[in-house]
Amino acid sequence: MTFSHKNKRYRRKTSYVASKKNLTIVEKEFIPVLLHKLKNGEIILEEVNKKSFSYYSDLFIKSKRGLKPNTLKEYNRYLKFWGLFFKDRNINEIKASEIKEAIFTKNIKTQGMKDYLCILKGVFEEAFIDDEIKSNPVDKIKLPRSKRKEILPFTKEEVNLLLSNAQGFFKCYLAVGFYTGIRTGELLALKWQNIDFKNKRIYINATVGNYAEQETKTGTSTRYVPLFNVLEGYLLEQKKKTGLNTYVFCTKSGGHYGSSNLDKYFWKPLLKRIGVPHRRMYETRHTFCTNMLESQKFSLNQIASWLGHANIQTLINRYNKYIPSEIAKFDETFSLFGTEKDTQNFRSA
């Protein structure tokens, strides 16, 4: 809680998690007690340092209130880490070398460091806008190049082996993953109302992260993926089990599965049982995409749309080596301007 007292600005923790219920408690209980103690001199307030790292850290997080709950939670986790080093420091005193020393205390990969630095950069950007610093020290930090995770799609034989040996709901779960390419969280949030058997479409408008449902990764409006005939049989069989529930894949209580539980109790045991080398369960998505590209039956725009990519460039950057070369195939008789005179003009020249 930030407030003014005797024309000075202060910050005070309430120990309550932000919610409408707790806001009422703070207004009716916490604030009256605070005012009483202020008048009696029972507490001494420390004035907010408007040049401190914590001041701009709070300013930064307030500007992100519209983010998804899980994303906001991650941001706060990053800021808590940086607060251990710079909390009460004047932001214009913090040097790039100090930031670099702090980030290397984390035993994480380069991409993880980039995530931490991205949030820190946002904090310093607030100070830059406020003319408290002349440049953003995070811009001066160079990290080692990160090695991008290699795509390891399953072969057609492996897909058939996995589907024929999976049991219960997990058989349908994998089938939907392989035949639609939707993300793990989107699979867990899939509802029966989103499956249109008549028009052969599966609509995607939510995802599950840490058991809480939220918008999809790109935050775009509802998209759909095609419901191929081969997948329909799996879904109809699953509907006999959970058709009366909201979600296609749910626990006995009707709640969400956790992706870590699926990985530990269903995915890894299945791979071990059938002798398929371990790969991430997320490879079902990559397997769908690479096979769709290799089939050459669909446009890049169609595939990008079904995957939920923000644009076609994302698809090209991620799956470039799996996109069949169209340059090698050309019609040598093609006339660029639609006339046979092209050749005649050349000959007459």
Image (cartoon, grey):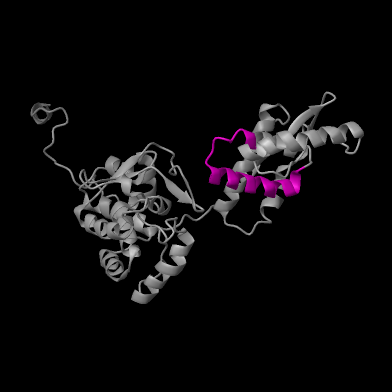
Q: Is residue 174 visible?
A: yes
Q: Quadrant of the C terminus?
A: top left
Q: Is residue 15 left or right of residue 107?
A: right
Q: Is residue 52 visible?
A: no
Q: How many marks?
A: 0
Residue at 41% over, 72% down: 269
Residue at 78% over, 37% down: 90
**Rendered location of residue 253, percent (x, y):** 44, 59
Q: Where is residue 231, by image quadrant?
A: bottom left
**Rendered location of residue 117, percent (x, y):** 62, 45
Residue 85 is one of the magenta-drawn residues: yes
**Rendered location of residue 114, percent (x, y):** 58, 48
Q: Is residue 111 left or right of residue 306?
A: right
Q: Where is residue 232, by image quadrant?
A: bottom left
**Residue nearer the viewer, 325 or 311:** 311
Q: Is residue 108 left or right of residue 5?
A: left
Does 181 sit above or below residue 280?
above
Q: Among all residues in the image, which is located at the extreme right?
A: 41
Q: Where is residue 135, by image quadrant?
A: top right
**Residue nearer the viewer, 163 or 115:** 163
Extent of the magenta region: 61-87
Residue 226 is one of the magenta-drawn residues: no
**Rendered location of residue 308, percent (x, y):** 36, 43
Residue at 60% over, 44% down: 75
Q: Quadrant of the N terminus?
A: top right
Does 309 sit above or below residue 133?
below
Residue at 41% over, 68% down: 266
Q: Among all residues in the image, which is located at the extreme top?
A: 7
- Prevailing SS of the magenta stretch: helix
